[in-house]
Image (tube, rainbow, N blue to C red):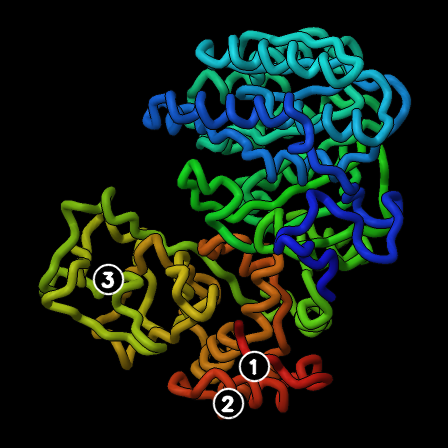
Amino acid sequence: MTLVPPSASGRRPHGSLIAGQSPAGLAHLATFDPMTSDVIVDIEERRQRTGNALDPVRRSELGQFFTPSEVAAFIAGMLDVTDRPARLLDPGAGVGSLTAAVVARWQQNGGGPLAVTAVEADPRLQEPLGQTIADLGQVHQLTGTVVEGDFIEWAAGHVSGFGVMDAPKFDLVVMNPPYRKIHTGSTERRTLAAAGIEVPNLYAGFVALAAELLDDQGQIVAIIPRSFTNGPYFQRFRKLLLDRIGLQQIHVLDSRDVAFADSAVLQENVIIRGVRGERPTAVFVSSSRSVSEPVTVRKVPYVEVVRPDDPEAFIHITLDEASAEFARQVLELPCRLPTLDLSVSTGPVVDFRAKEHLRQVPGSDTVPLIFPAHLRHGSVVWPQPNGKKPNALVRCEETERSLMPSGTYVVVKRFSSKEERRRITATVVSSADLPGEKFAFENHLNVFHRSGGGLPGRLADGLAAFLNTTTVDQFFRQFNGHTQVNATDLRNLRYPSVEDLEALGDVATFDLEQEKLDEIAADLLPTFASVPIAKSA
C-alpha cells in the first residue's frame, strides 16, 4: 500500500510518520523539517557552495558525493530519538550535512545532548566542516570533534591496533560513505585486512568499520548502493554486517538519478537502518521514488529478507505482496543445481587475455567463440562477419583448457542493458548452431553444463524456458539491484525437477511471447500454479 501522501504543496514532509503507526512501530520515520532552522539553511547553502567549488575529477577519485538536505533529513528521520546523552559518528562527513540533519532532529524532538565526531579526509573541507559543527552548537547542546584524516585508517587503527574493546564507541552512526572500488594491493585493502575486513568497495569498508565502533544497542543509518545485497564479492561483508547489526529497515529509492541529482550520480541506492546486537524477527521494507515522495512499506519476517539456509546470505527485498508471492513460488521449488546434476560457470575465455588467439574469420585451426553479441532474441547468430566481436578462437595448447566439448548448453548473459525487459536472459546453444567438436564461451556469459559437458536437449530447453519466466525475473530482482548476473546468483536459485523441466522444454519454444511462456510455466510447474503470473514491469 502507498503511505504518507504528499502535502498540499505536493511534497511529503521530511520523514513523516506513516498513517496509523507509531515511531517505534514503523521504521522511525519522524515528522520534522530541518529547513525551518536558519542555521540548517546556511549549512545547506555551504554544502552547495563548497561542492560547486571542488574539482569534479578529484571528487570522483575520492568517491565523494555530498548529501543533499532532503536526503540527509530522511536519513536522520529514521533514527530513534532518545533523551539520553548520545555519541554521534559521521564518517566521511563532508561539510557536515548529515550531522546537521541529526542535530535538527534531536533539537526539534527533545533529544538529549550530543557529542559529535565528524571524520573527513579532504583538507579542503576541514574549514567548512568545522564551521558547521560550530554553527550547530547554536541550536542544540553539542560538543564536537573534527578528525582530520582518512576514516578507514582512523577506525581500523582502533579496531586492529588495540582491539574492539579499546576502540571509541558510538550510540549513533549516520553515513553517506564514498563509493569507489578498492584495488588489490592498495593501502585501503591492507588497512582493512589488518582489521579483519575484506570488502571490494570503500562504502562497504566504511559500513563494516562503523559497525565495529557501534556500542551495544547503537543505531546505524547509511545510504549505500544496493550492490551489496548479492553476489560473491560482498559475501564476507554481508556476513559481518548481519552478524553485528540487526536490520530494522531497508528503504529502496526507486529512481536511480534523484538521490544525488546535483552531483549527476546514477546509482540504485538503499538506506539501511540497524541496531548493534539485536536479532529482529521482522524488518520494515519500504520504498519511494525519492525521499520527498510517497512511501510504501511492508513489515516482513526477517527470514524473508535473509534466508536462514542461504550460505551466501543474500538480502532479499520484497516491496509488495506480489513480490512475496514470486519469492514463494521459487523458494518452494524442489531442487538445487547439484540435485539436477548440473553446474553453472562463468565463460572461461577472457578476451583481452586471449587477444593473440582471437579471429574474426573462423578457420581450420579455430573453434566457434560465443560472445553475448552472438545471442539475439533467444537464438544463436553465428558467425557475424561484420560484427564487433571475434567469431573464433584458435585451438592450441594455450587455449585447450578454455574449451568445452560440442553439445547443448544453456547460457545466460552476465550483463543486461537497463532497457531489457528481463535481468536473466537464457539461450540454448547447441551443435545445431555451431560446427566442430569444441566450443568456446566468453567471460561475459554464464554457462550451464553437466560435468563440463553438454546437457540433454529436452532438459536444456526446459531450463532456458524456466529461467526466462517472469517469476524467476521478479524473484531475482529482489536480491539483485544491478544489471549483473553472477554464476553465484544462479547457483542460489531453486529449480524444478528434471521431469518438470523436460515437460516444460517439450512445449516452450524460444520464440514464445512472454505472457504465453508464463502461462505454460504456470500450467506445468506445481509451485507456479497457485496464482496467475503477473506481467513484467
Crowding near pointer 2: few (<14 within 10 Å), some, many (20+)? Answer: few
Picture layout, residue 376 above or below residue 293: below
Q: In which quarter of the image is residue 317?
A: bottom right
- Where is mark 2, residue-wise? 516
Between disc 3 and disc 2, the foreground one is: 2
Residue type of the residue flagged with mark 3: Leu
Q: In which quarter of the image is residue 219?
A: top right
In space, the residues marked 3 and 2 are separated at their CA atoms by 32 Å
Picture layout, residue 493 above or below residue 130: below
Is the N terminus in the top left, top right, bottom left or bottom right quadrant?
bottom right
In space, the residues marked 1 and 2 are separated at their CA atoms by 17 Å
- Where is mark 3, residue-wise? 369
Q: Camera-side residue: 154 or 177? A: 177
Count of marks overlaid on the render: 3
For residue 190, say whether it is visible.
yes
Picture layout, residue 518 above or below residue 328: below
- The percent coordinates of residue 18 (x first, y second) are 79, 53
Q: Camera-side residue: 106 or 428? A: 106
Give the label on residue 192, or none.
none
In contact (CB < 8 Å): disc 3 and disc 1: no
- The percent coordinates of residue 492 (x first, y second) are 61, 58
Residue at 15% across, 64% down: 387
Crowding near pointer 3: few (<14 within 10 Å), some, many (20+)? Answer: many
Element class at badge 2: helix
Residue at 87% across, 53% down: 21
